[in-house]
Amino acid sequence: MTATATTLVTGATGTTGSRTVRRMLAAGHRVRAASRRATALPGTDPVRFDWYEPGTFGDALAGTDRVYLVPPVGEPDPASVMLPFLRRARAAGVRRAVLLGSSAVPVGGPAVGRVHQALPGLFDEWAVLRPSWFMQNFTGGHLHARSIREDGVIRTAAGSGRVGFVDADDIAAVAVHALTDDRAPDGDLVLTGPEALSYDDAAAIVGEVIGRPVVHRHLTYDGFRDHLAAGMPLGFAELLAGLDRAIAGGAEDRTTDTVRRLTGRSPHGFRQVVERELTRGR
């Protein structure tokens, strides 16, 4: 990546976007930080960007060489929203695109899987990051983190299925490599932590770290869908409940060496991240 290249980071104030921005700046790269409010992030060129407002696309793309793509949150059909922007990006001269996908959604699959499918035909250089579930779901503003704080409960339809939970910091570290290495991955990268844990395991670890009991409440698909639908569109609730049902069937019971292979270090462990984020400031 040349010194004059500019990377557009969408979702620049979000979980992976903010971490990617910080790492890009620390490595000396120029970053255009895109968010709906054009939030001023130190060291960046802030720009207003909204997936649902094509009028914001031009300024965001001006002079941009590559983009980090975070799909719109809660959108059950991100391809319908993202593809017009991606075509505009290609026409504007963007050479490399790195998409935040999901380990649960393969190329051509539902939701972001359709964006994944389109990417190689749009850009000469590309990558799709397919992380497992974020460790930060238990520590930040996610539904699980809120229910832990409020009720000491984690509710899922995942049963005893295991997940290779991954640290968002590790996702960002891989994103920077995918965006800036001389050779783009030109493929998909499944990202996990070092071990696969059940939600029962995760609840026990979080409880030990915060010093009070946390339990995992096993819900049915219907029960979890209805629980989620109280705070989001039904279609998205159905999608998430379906992913939990796949976890219960073993779909996410795996680990990969991708973080180590691209960054040269081991991925962070679940207890390490929970302690780092839930004991900070104590």
Image: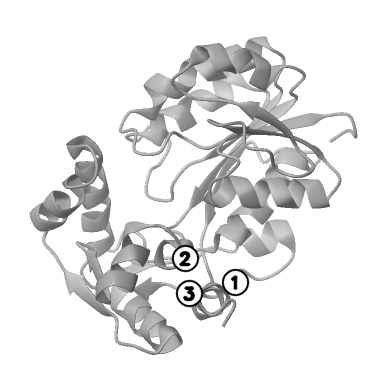
Check if mark 2's residue and mark 1's residue have beta carbons within 8 Å: yes
Q: Tag on residue 144?
A: none
| Side (left or right) of 267 relative to 234 | right
Residue 87 shows in this picture: no
Rendered image quadrant of residue 115: top left
The C terminus lies in quadrant: bottom right
| Side (left or right) of 38 relative to 110 | right
* Local crowd size for mark 1, using a 10 Å CA cut-off: few (<14), some (14–19), many (≥20): many
Provide the residue designation for mark 3: 195
Which label lies toward us, 2 or 1? 2
Q: Residue at x 76, y 38 (%)?
A: 44
Q: Residue at x 76, y 45 (%)?
A: 42
Disc 3 marks a residue whose amino acid type is Glu
Residue sitting nearer the eye, 178 or 67: 67
Q: Tag on residue 268?
A: 1
Mark-to-mark CA distance, 3 and 2: 12 Å
Q: Is label 3 in a helix, a strand or a loop?
A: loop
Q: Tag on residue 135?
A: 2
Check if mark 3's residue and mark 1's residue have beta carbons within 8 Å: no
Question: Is 5 above or below relative to 16?
Answer: above
Q: Residue 134 placed where, x, y %?
A: 46, 59
Disc 2 marks a residue whose amino acid type is Met
Q: Which residue is drawn at 67% across and 41% down?
A: 185
* Local crowd size for mark 2, using a 10 Å CA cut-off: few (<14), some (14–19), many (≥20): many
Q: Is label 2 in a helix, a strand or a loop?
A: helix
| Side (left or right) of 46 relative to 182 | left
Q: Is label 1 in a helix, a strand or a loop?
A: loop
Question: Is 205 above or below relative to 225?
Answer: below
